[in-house]
Amino acid sequence: MALGAAYDRVRRCTERLCEPLELEDYLLQTVVEASPPRWHLAHVSWFFETFLLRPSVPGYRVFHEPFDYLFNSYYEQTGGGFWPRPERGLLSRPTVAEVYAYRRHVDAGIADLIDRCPAADWPGVAARLEIGLNHEQQHQELLLTDIKRNFAYNPLRPAYRADLPATSITDTSPVEYFPFNGGLVEIGAGTQGFSWDNERPRHRVFLAPFALADRPVTNGEYLAFMADCGYRTPALWLADGWTAVQSKGWNAPLYWESTADGWQVMTLAGMRSLNPAEPVCHLSYYEADAFAAWAGRRLPTEAEWEHAATALPVRGRFLDDGWLHPQPAPAGQTGLRQMFGDIWEWTASAYLPYPGYHPPAGALGEYNGKFMCNQMVLRGGSCASPRDHLRASYRNFFYPHERWQFQGLRLAEDRP
């Protein structure tokens, strides 16, 4: 079955991402939001075991019962509780070898389920299998961003992969703004293909006329904001953002380091000189909003972003392309560029349910719905996102102070 091949492909991809790691790297958690690679490998297997194998396979033999507690992320309705997120890096056991054995056990169970599933049960099993695959793809991106966060903590600034390519492009064209008439438009996922519950239902929204920048903001443009005292001008900042700047000592994006030779930036290939043509990334929502205020523009709403992106192909630099770092906007293209891939783009929209939204029943209803408070929406995907995981209706969401994902911005403006 096609889903069986997709399962094998996704699971092998996750493990390939771990091949450059040393054993010590698997256990590391330097900040609360960045989990150890070992945890990611086990958690996605726990997901398949909990939501597919346990309920669908009569007499299924659980690999190790305590894993239900250690590798649950936040699901309250499964009943087993979960180990505290800030303490995922404090345990030396289970070993990495045991976690890989866990993955093999779950893989064998899924293969057997696919082969033996009664036809009457297959639609429900297939739907949950597709959720599990998309869930693991999300963790592939988290795996890379968490490795980067953990490695950046180390004063040696180790490289995850020193062989990653680097671009020779160091300049970019001036930004252009493309107008949209607005009006009554539809956004949200339709009934064809996979989508998360938070992308539904499809519904109508009214948009005033607006214009969208043809590319994301670059490092060079953000340097101009910094040079103009952007981090020292409270009038540019939301109140919570200004508090974050002062309490956290922000004076540049995450991973930027000022040296005698100029700005350096930590990448998955180690330290590199800052390229002014690359999209600026690892920004909080507060920094993105402050830059937009400084530039005399604003962030687009998620409805504006989706309306602009709907007719575009999902084309850009993704995990599949192997850069693992945002690249300059491609030259020689007209229209909107880099709407997909390279960086997630902050929008001005709070992460809230769409009109008529109802979370799925049971524990899977905790996947998205219970987080619809105090977070902001991002769109488009990044250089660490799998290409086939994305679409125009995809809604990512993070707290406004968080910076460790590949997060940047594209400017918008009102039109008469």
Image (cartoon, helix red, strand yellow):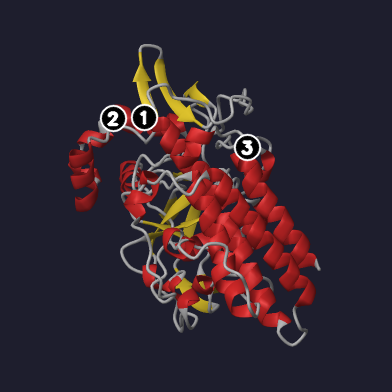
The three-letter amino acid code for the residue at tag 2 is Asp
Q: Label 2 neighbourhood size at 10 Å, few (<14), some (14-19), many (20+)?
A: few
Residue with the mark numbered 2? 228
Question: Looking at the image, is 173 positioned above or below residue 168?
Answer: below
Label 3, label 1: how far apart the Cα atoms are: 39 Å
Q: Nearer the viewer, residue 286 or 322?
A: 322
Question: Looking at the image, is 232 positioned above or below residue 1?
Answer: above
The three-letter amino acid code for the residue at tag 1 is Ala
Badge 1 marks a residue whose secondary structure is helix
Q: Label 1 neighbourhood size at 10 Å, few (<14), some (14-19), many (20+)?
A: few
Horizontal and vertical percent position of residue 223: 38, 29
Residue with the mark numbered 3? 19
CB under 8 Å between discs 2 and 3: no
Residue at 40% in and 75% down:
79
Q: Quadrant of the C terminus?
A: bottom left
Badge 3 marks a residue whose secondary structure is loop
- N-terminal of the two: label 2 or label 3? 3
Horizontal and vertical percent position of residue 20: 60, 33
**Closer to us: mark 2 or mark 3?**
3
CB under 8 Å between discs 2 and 1: yes
Q: Is residue 125 visible?
A: yes
Horizontal and vertical percent position of residue 312: 66, 57
- N-terminal of the two: label 3 or label 1? 3
* Label of residue 224 in the image: 1
Q: Quadrant of residue 392?
A: bottom right
